[in-house]
């Protein structure tokens, strides 16, 4: 995927800012429980994101997934120290790789390092929110990044080729439209497929709309919708959200 230099720089800036904020929140207290990730604490979040960073650094280095993973002894490391080390390394690793390096990704349409620029920025934004929720100190998500996050979770996570065998607990049969900041995504979903089209054409069973941050965090299960943010079949909306959750575990 072609990624303009200014967009690459934007993702790196978001990644730096949100990883710095997550480190700051981590220092407010590691044992705090993360309600948005049941069973997790802030320490769990930091360890998870650190391992994600280190894993992607190895992918960029090798061009493939590292095996075995994770490295021996990583769970014995101090969480804050491990996270600080990993966040200090991820931006240089992406910058050195550039945006055209052939490498492993889980995208059916993009096998270049450009994929990891957006993915790492969005991974960090979601888990920064987790840490902030644990300490009740939530700050805004960049509006443009949140809009990108809506596109990613719908077109890649939900709309990927994952459903052909009907492996879902939520075989919703409906057409749902998500609309935010002048953009729309229309998803036709059934038990064995999810087709996402970036437009607002045709009739739908329900539409969900709102600010990019609200919808981004709702799709990721970090924020509830209010009654004024959807129209149409409420049950279809709930099942659609559950289907998104299956696709983004």
Image: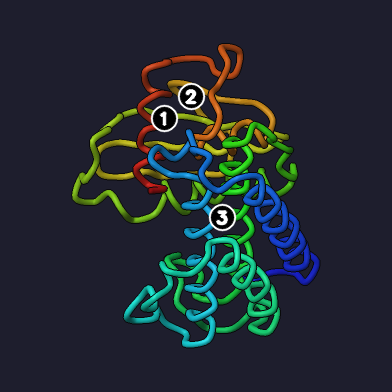
For mark 2, what is the residue?
203
Q: Distance between the residues labelled 2 and 3?
A: 33 Å
Residue 199, given in percent of the width and then of the height, sits at 58, 39
Q: What element carries label 2?
A: loop
Along the line of sight, the residue nearer the viewer: 99 or 42: 42
Tell me the element at label 3. helix
Whether the residues at callouts 1 and 2 have beta carbons within 8 Å, the answer is: yes
Mark carried by residue 123? 3
Q: Which mark is residue 175?
A: 1
Q: Give 10 or 18, whichever is nearer the viewer.
A: 18
Q: Name the N-terminal-most of marks 2 and 3.
A: 3
Q: How crowded is mark 3: few (under 14 residues within 10 Å), some or many (20 or more)?
A: some
Compared with 94, 210 (above or below) is above
Residue drawn at the location 68% of the way across and 35% of the way down: 138
Which residue is the extreme one toward the bottom?
62
Number of dots carrying numbers: 3
Quarter of the image where one finds residue 39: top left
Q: Which of marks 3 and 1 is nearer the N terminus?
A: 3
Q: Which residue is drawn at 29% across and 36% down?
A: 190
Q: What element carries label 1?
A: strand
Q: What is the CA distance from the residue labelled 1 to the residue labelled 2?
A: 8 Å
Location of residue 169 (image quadrant): top left
């Amino acid at each position: 995927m072609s990624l303009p230099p200014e967009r690459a720089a934007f993702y790196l800036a978001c990644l730096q800012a949100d990883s710095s904020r997550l480190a700051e929140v981590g220092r407010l207290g590691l044992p705090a429980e993360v309600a948005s990730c049941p069973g997790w604490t802030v320490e769990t979040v930091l360890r998870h994101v650190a391992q994600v960073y280190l894993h992607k650094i190895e992918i960029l280095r090798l061009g493939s997934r590292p095996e075995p993973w994770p490295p021996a002894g990583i769970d014995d490391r101090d969480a804050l120290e491990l996270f600080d080390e990993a966040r200090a390394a991820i931006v240089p690793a992406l910058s050195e790789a550039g945006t055209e390096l052939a490498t492993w990704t889980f995208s059916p349409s993009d096998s270049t390092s450009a994929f990891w620029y957006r993915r790492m920025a969005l991974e960090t934004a979601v888990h920064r929110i987790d840490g902030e929720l644990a300490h009740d100190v939530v700050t805004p998500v960049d509006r443009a990044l949140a809009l990108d996050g809506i596109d990613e979770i719908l077109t890649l996570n939900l709309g990927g080729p994952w459903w052909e065998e009907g492996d879902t607990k939520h075989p919703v049969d409906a057409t749902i439209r998500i609309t935010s900041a002048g953009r729309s995504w229309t998803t036709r979903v059934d038990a064995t497929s999810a087709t996402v089209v970036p437009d607002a054409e045709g009739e739908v069973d329900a539409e969900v709309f709102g600010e990019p941050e609200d919808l981004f965090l709702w799709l990721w299960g970090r924020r509830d919708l209010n009654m004024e943010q959807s129209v149409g079949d409420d049950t279809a909306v709930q099942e659609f959200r559950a289907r998104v959750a299956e696709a983004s575990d």
